[in-house]
Image (tube, grey):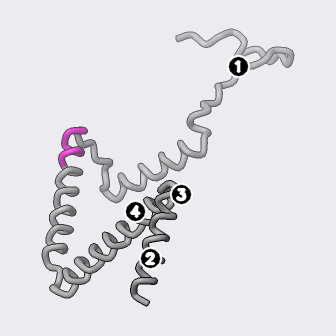
């Protein structure tokens, strides 16, 4: 390939062509990535190119193993832990029932509240 004419001329008025700067190569992220890839290649750690299906299957398998371990841990609960969980559930259930009763009483019409008060006072008089 022949060289252009302007390279041989020493004319200072000519604008000489310069190689364009590649913005990708000058970016900091690209340089860091390239450096990391070179270091991994020297160590013998090539990036893994696994198919997407294989990645998904491995993730499912990991999740399944974790789930099995959690189930085994639950099965191995001591008798004390089981009893404590039962009591906790009973207490939560009683608390929910109390809340429901209290909400029903708050939402009840005025005449129902007055009637309940009259019954209580009637019972107190009968007891005395």
From the image, which quarter does the C terminus lie in?
Answer: bottom left
The residue at which mark 2 appears reads as 122
The residue at which mark 3 appears reads as 110
Q: Which residues are magenta?
A: 52-57
Q: Earlier in the sequence, mark 4 or mark 3?
A: 4
The residue at which mark 1 appears reads as 17
**Mark 4 in CB contact with mark 1 (< 8 angstroms):** no
Seen at 40% across and 65% down, the residue is 101
Q: Earlier in the sequence, mark 4 or mark 1?
A: 1
Q: Earlier in the sequence, mark 1 or mark 3?
A: 1
Q: Comparing marks 3 and 2, which lies closer to the viewer?
A: 2
Distance of label 4 from label 1 (alpha carbons):
85 Å
- Under circle 2, the secondary element is helix
Q: Is residue 92 left or right of residue 63?
A: right
Q: Comparing marks 4 and 1, which lies closer to the viewer?
A: 4
**Mark 4 in CB contact with mark 3 (< 8 angstroms):** no
Q: Earlier in the sequence, mark 1 or mark 2?
A: 1
Q: Comparing marks 4 and 2, which lies closer to the viewer?
A: 2
- Residue 26 % position (x, y): 61, 39
Residue count near mark 2 (Cα–Cα under 10 Å), binned few <14, some 14–19, many ≥20: few
Q: Comparing marks 1 and 2, which lies closer to the viewer?
A: 2
Seen at 20% across and 68% down, the residue is 70
Seen at 16% across and 67% down, the residue is 71
The circle on residue 100 is 4
Q: Is residue 122 left or right of residue 83?
A: right
Distance of label 3 from label 2 (alpha carbons):
18 Å
Distance of label 1 from label 2 (alpha carbons):
109 Å
**Mark 1 in CB contact with mark 3 (< 8 angstroms):** no
- Residue 107 % position (x, y): 49, 55
Q: Main secondary structure of the magenta part?
A: helix
- Residue 63 % position (x, y): 22, 56
Q: Comparing marks 4 and 3, which lies closer to the viewer?
A: 3
């Amino acid at each position: 390939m022949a060289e252009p004419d302007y390279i041989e001329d020493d004319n200072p008025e000519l604008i000489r062509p310069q190689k364009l700067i590649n913005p990708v190569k000058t970016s900091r992220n690209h340089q860091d990535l390239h450096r990391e890839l070179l270091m991994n290649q020297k160590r013998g750690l090539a990036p893994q190119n696994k198919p997407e299906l294989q990645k998904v299957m491995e993730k499912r398998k990991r999740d399944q193993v974790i789930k099995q371990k959690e189930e085994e841990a639950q099965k191995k609960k001591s008798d004390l832990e089981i009893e404590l969980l039962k009591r906790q559930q009973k207490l939560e259930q009683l608390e929910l029932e109390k809340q429901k009763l209290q909400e029903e009483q708050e939402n009840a019409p005025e005449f129902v509240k007055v009637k309940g008060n009259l019954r209580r006072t009637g019972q107190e008089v009968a007891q005395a």
